[in-house]
Image (cartoon, grey):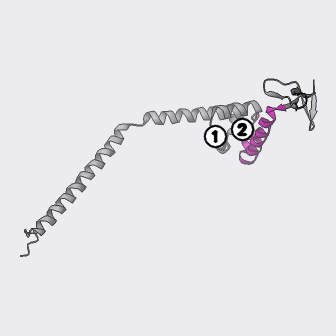
């Protein structure tokens, strides 16, 4: 069964589609009846709009990515944004644009972006595992030594002031 709305042909609903059945309250009959024909709302329409915006962004900001032999499909668009943060995906696409042999060495925009994102994720994890807390300990030791020196100077200065107040020799040599 096909139904046409706003120049779009909708088919029977599948997993992505939702059927919205208008319900009309009949106050006189005190019962709820359904409308004669259901209204189909296609969820993939909103995905298509987002995908279209994504393609426009690619065309403007990363034209070489858009010109790859296999550009992003709607399904690939959904997958990559489901698996990775939006900011990371867009940053990788910008980095891919800057890679001179992108189109000659790579075929699929989706697979290339996914590969680059995985590599970035691994490098980030590697950097975190290479972080050595002992270096932080060394910094803490240096800071604590500096604090001790500062405390000693403050204590010595206070002792010097106390000695002057008591009339003790200030150590300047002038009598």
158 in relation to 90, above or below? below
Residue at screen point 78% across, 37% down: 46
In this picture, residue 31 sits left or right of residue 107: right
* Residue ranking furthest to the left: 175
Q: Where is residue 56, by image quadrant?
A: top right
167 in relation to 55, above or below? below
> Residue 149: x and y, percent?
23, 54
Q: For the magenta stretch, what is the residue range?
A: 41-69
Residue 92, label in figure: 1
Could you give the CA–CA distance between mark 1 and mark 2, rounded to whole angstroms? 15 Å
Mark 2 packing: few (<14 Cα in 10 Å), some, or many (20+)? some
Mark 1 packing: few (<14 Cα in 10 Å), some, or many (20+)? some
Residue at screen point 87% across, 24% down: 12
Q: Where is residue 78, by image quadrant?
A: top right
Q: Are marks 1 and 2 in contact (CB under 8 Å)?
A: no
* Closer to us: 30 or 22: 30
Residue 103, label in figure: 2
> Residue 81: x and y, percent?
67, 35
Main SS category, magenta section: helix
Residue at screen point 84% across, 32% down: 41
> Residue 66: x and y, percent?
75, 40
Residue 25, label in figure: none
* Closer to us: 152 or 58: 152
Q: Is residue 64 magenta?
A: yes
Q: Of label 1 and label 2, which has the lower sequence position? A: 1
Q: Is residue 147 magenta?
A: no
Of the two numbered discs 1 and 2 in the rendering, the one whose residue sits closer to the viewer: 1
Which element type, helix, strand or loop, lies under badge 1? Answer: helix
In this picture, residue 10 sits left or right of residue 66: right
Could you tell me if residue 112 is visible in this image?
Answer: no
* Closer to us: 37 or 148: 37
């Amino acid at each position: 069964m096909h139904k046409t709305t706003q120049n779009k042909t909708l088919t029977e609903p599948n997993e992505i589609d939702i059927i919205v059945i208008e319900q009309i309250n009949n106050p006189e009959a005190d019962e709820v009846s359904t409308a004669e024909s259901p209204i189909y709302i296609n969820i993939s329409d909103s995905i298509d709009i987002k995908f279209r915006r994504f393609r426009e962004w690619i065309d403007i900001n990363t034209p070489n990515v858009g010109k790859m032999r296999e550009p992003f499909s709607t399904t690939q668009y959904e997958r990559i944004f489901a698996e990775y943060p939006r900011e990371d995906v867009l940053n990788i696409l910008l980095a891919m644009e800057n890679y001179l042999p992108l189109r000659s060495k790579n075929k699929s925009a989706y697979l290339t972006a996914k590969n680059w994102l995985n590599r970035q994720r691994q490098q980030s994890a590697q950097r975190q595992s290479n972080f050595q807390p002992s270096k932080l300990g060394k910094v803490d030791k240096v800071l604590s030594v500096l604090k001790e020196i500062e405390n000693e100077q403050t204590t010595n200065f206070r002792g010097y002031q106390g000695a002057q107040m008591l009339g003790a020799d200030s150590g300047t040599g002038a009598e």
